[in-house]
């Protein structure tokens, strides 16, 4: 069975929408701001790039997976589309910093 959780993610005075999809094989996390999205490694960076969507991604490992929104917000960004880079999002910053630029 798939469990979908939607919750508000506060960033300063802004509120993003966090969506977590859980299923027996793992989970997917995406946080949606007004101008860009922040995802876990389960989302394909190249697809977002192909469609010119502002996206930044943080990737966990099998030993340290990103399971929660806080995990994504504290992880370092590993991929950024050109459109997200135009918003000031850079590889190496933490997810919270990237999300602040999604508004």
Image: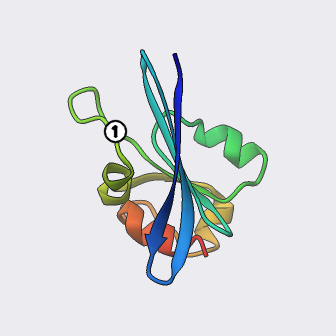
Residue 43, given in percent of the width and then of the height, sits at 56, 37
Residue displayed at 38% across by 51% down: 72
Q: Which residue occupies the foreground of this view, 20 or 49?
A: 20
Q: Is residue 62 left or right of residue 24?
A: left
Residue displayed at 64% across by 40% down: 46
Above/below status of 4 relative to 77:
above
Residue 47, given in percent of the width and then of the height, sits at 69, 38
Query: Toward which corner of the image does residue 37 lie, by quadrant?
Result: bottom right
Residue displayed at 33% across by 55% down: 70
- Crowding near the residue tagged with mark 1, few <14, some 14–19, many ≥20 C-alpha atoms within 10 Å: some
Describe the element under mark 1 as helix, strand or loop.
loop
The C terminus sits in image quarter: bottom right
Q: Is residue 81 left or right of residue 20?
A: right
Q: Which residue occupies the foreground of this view, 55 or 16?
A: 16
Q: Is residue 66 left or right of residue 23?
A: left
Q: Which residue occupies the foreground of this view, 78 or 66?
A: 66
Above/below status of 68 relative to 22:
below
Residue displayed at 44% across by 30% down: 27
Residue linked to disc 1 = 67
Spot the residue most to the left: 63
Spot the residue most to the right: 51
Spot the residue most to the bottom: 13
The figure's colour scheme reads rainbow
Residue 98, given in percent of the width and then of the height, sits at 47, 67
Residue 29, given in percent of the width and then of the height, sits at 48, 42
């Amino acid at each position: 069975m798939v469990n979908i959780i939607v919750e508000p993610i506060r960033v300063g005075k802004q509120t993003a929408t966090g969506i977590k999809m859980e299923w027996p094989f793992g989970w997917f996390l995406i946080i949606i701001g007004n101008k860009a999205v922040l995802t876990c490694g389960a989302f394909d960076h190249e697809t977002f790039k192909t469609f010119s969507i502002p996206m930044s991604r943080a990737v966990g490992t099998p030993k340290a997976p990103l399971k929660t929104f806080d995990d994504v917000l504290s992880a370092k960004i590993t991929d950024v589309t050109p459109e997200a880079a135009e918003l000031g999002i850079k590889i190496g910053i933490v997810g919270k910093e990237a999300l602040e630029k999604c508004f």
